[in-house]
Image (cartoon, coloured by chain):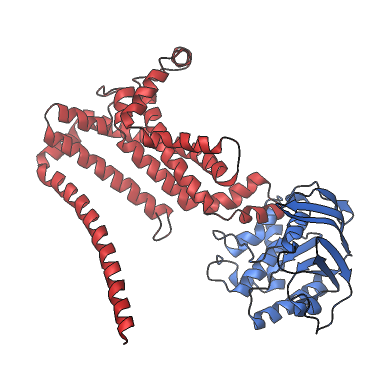
Amino acid sequence: MIRVDQLSLRVGSFALSGVTFEVPDGGYAVLMGATGSGKTCLVEAICGLRPILDGRIEVGNRRVERLDPADRGIGYVPQDGALFPAMTVREQVELPLRVRKVQRAEVRARAGQVAEMLGIEAIMSRTPRGLSGGERQRVALARAMVFQPGVICLDEPFSALDEPTRLGMYDMIESLRRRTGLTALHVTHSSDEAQRLGDIVLRLEHGHVNSRPKISPNDTSLT
Amino acid sequence: MTARTGTRRVSQRLFLGASAAVMGAYAALLLAMLAAMILYTSPAALVQTFQSREIRHAAALSLVTSTIAAIVSLWVAVPTGYLLARFRFPGKRLLDLLFDIPILLPPLVVGIALLIMFRTIPGRWFEGSVFLVTYETPAIILAQFTVACAFAVRTMRVTFEGIDPRMEDVARTLGCSRGSAFFHVTLREARPGVIAAGTLAWARALGEFGPVLVFAGTTRMKTEVLPTSVFLEWNLGEIEGALAVSILLVLIAVVVLGATRLLGLPRGGL
């Protein structure tokens, strides 16, 4: 579960205030809003990468707004994946476990499990150079999921993918939800993506978040 | 083929041709210098130089001191370059300018400044209570380090500026502290830059002459390094000897830099 209560932040002249929403355990929330509405700022603040002025952030009934990003238990998938160019896929996926001093055998086993779930076993020894857009996002997702965080935040993860790859990624997310009970906050511009994946739609407008029922397939107001 | 396409091809060829000509002219200058040095020196003078106990000592001392100076430069340049590249803080511009001083100053002035520094009360206290520096081996290392480190700092700053800070942000969400994100992710990405900074610092230290001459002196079998050997031989009128030592210096530099490139860098790097 993730609960954000009366969160305020300021970046230069841009501000968000009184942002409040909740995503229950196993829920999949999509966060929509026009370009420049502050979606990425909000997600970065939740992940601990931006300071907040005020408010509460809870992940699994634990307040995290004063914790380091490392201690929040939130997996983060940025827009382009932000894979580490000098590391192999295996090294990237194993990194969150290695920094947590997990035993080597368990590191291998858990990284293998996640790789199998996301279909990246065949590319584990490769570096990000030369991976396709879809492969890169799968690796970024594997890396964010391997330490079993309470919540995953995805910032427009599929915006740069072509149509068939994007549809494949939707299938994969749905499969992950069935297998792991994933709780997620997913930023997107796409009404189709929101329609297909989200069971909660959050709309960021004028510095506030409004929760509303799932949008209809014909709604294009936010694209 | 339209006339416009033809003109574009000609201008493209002109551009590439002019670039190649400039590159070729510089390479030719360097090759001509090396050829002149080799042709002016007889094999007998080379053998005699390589067999000289004093020159062998100077070569060994050059290798050891420049390697130590390069390692210490990296230890300083990596955190300094990182802080300059990543953070804003009061006095940053001033500090940036300060780190350029060893590059801007004539090398001889660096040596004089170091010499005077050890004539001040703290300098004298250090030499009296800790260890002797002036005209001793530590003076060679300090003189080499002072100049070489400025080049290493500049290289590391540019390297870190070229690495996306979001990598560290992502690493921190994955469980890394700021420090472990730096060591696990950023420093690994910076590896070609670290090697470039290390080799630049080492090469600069190996060839350092002015500050070493003033601050460490040129005592044979004690503080004589290869650049000062060249100076000594030249002063004695031994032009062939000076050239033979220079060739030795070039050979050492080529072997060490060549090996570093082969071992440490991806193809086409540095």
Give the x, y percent position of residue A166. Answer: 68, 79
**What residue is rendered at 43% in x and 59% in y?**
B266
Question: Does the rendering let one see residue A182?
Answer: no
How far across and how far down the image is residue A33, in percent?
77, 69
Q: Is residue A96 above or below residue B200?
A: below
- Which tint is chain A? blue
Q: Residue furthest bottom?
A: B1
Quadrant position of the C terminus of chain A in the picture = bottom right
Horizontal side, residue A132 vs residue B4: left or right: right
Q: Above or below — where is B219 with respect to B241?
A: above
- The residue located at (80%, 60%) in the rendering is A207
Which quarter of the picture shows residue A84? bottom right
In the rendered image, which quarter contains the N terminus of chain A?
Answer: bottom right
Q: In this rendering, does residue A165 appear at all?
A: yes
Task: For chain B, give the colour.
Answer: red
> Image check: B266 left or right of A213?
left
